[in-house]
Image (cartoon, grey):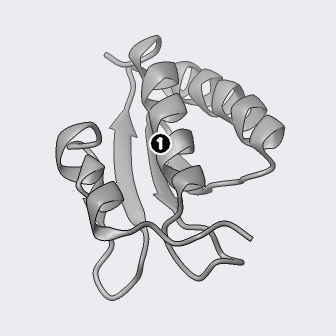
Amino acid sequence: MAALLNDHERSILKTELANWAVVPKRDAITRTYSFKDFKSAFAFMTQCALHAEAMNHHPEWFNVWNRVEVTLSTHDAGGLTQRDIELARAMDRCAAQHLI
């Protein structure tokens, strides 16, 4: 099982992952991406799904038209782990290819 992030590791959230927010009352992070249309949003989700599957670490996400809301937390660890940081970085890289 992955270890929960320590305080130093969580500092990355304020610097590298500044577009992600901590979910209130939950040890998770969230971000909403907006794309030009549904096709771009779905392409982003497809690309992220391949990364998530390769990591065996799957996001909670919700899509309506051009918007994708993502929440990351490692359920079996009970909160944020390095796996969430890695997937957030991968999702940000994928989004850069599809964002408006």
Would you say residue 6 is visible in this rendering? yes
In the image, residue 41 above or below residue 31? above
* Nearest to the observer: residue 43 or residue 7: 7
Total residue callouts: 1
Residue toward you, 82 or 8:
8
Q: Is residue 62 visible?
A: no
Depicted 27 relative to depicted 2: above or below: below
User: Position of 83 compared to 99: left or right?
Assistant: right
Q: Where is residue 60? Give x, y as percent.
A: 60, 61
5 w.r.t. 77: above or below: above
Q: Quadrant of the N terminus?
A: bottom right
Query: How many other residues sit within 10 Å of disc 1, few (<14), some (14-19) or many (≥20)?
Result: many
Q: Residue at coordinates 48% horizontally, 68% vertically from top-left?
A: 80
Question: Looking at the picture, which amino acid does disc 1 mark?
Answer: Ala
Locate residue 84, reporting x and y percent. 53, 54
- Position of the C terminus by quadrant: top left
Depth order, front residue of 63/97 = 97
Residue at screen point 18% across, 41% down: 15
Whether 35 is drawn above or below 100: the answer is below
Report helix, strand or loop for mark 1.
helix
**Does residue 48 appear to the left or right of 85 in the view shown?**
right
For residue 95, side relative to residue 61 (left or right): left
Image-based side of 41 in relation to 95, left or right: right
Q: Residue furthest top?
A: 97
Q: Position of residue 70 (x, y in %)?
A: 48, 53
Residue shown at 66% from the left, 66% from the top: 2
Give the image location of residue 55, x and y in percent.
76, 42
The quadrant holding residue 42 is: top right
Query: Which residue is identified by label 1?
Result: 88
> What residue is shown at x 71% (from left), y 29% (from top)?
46
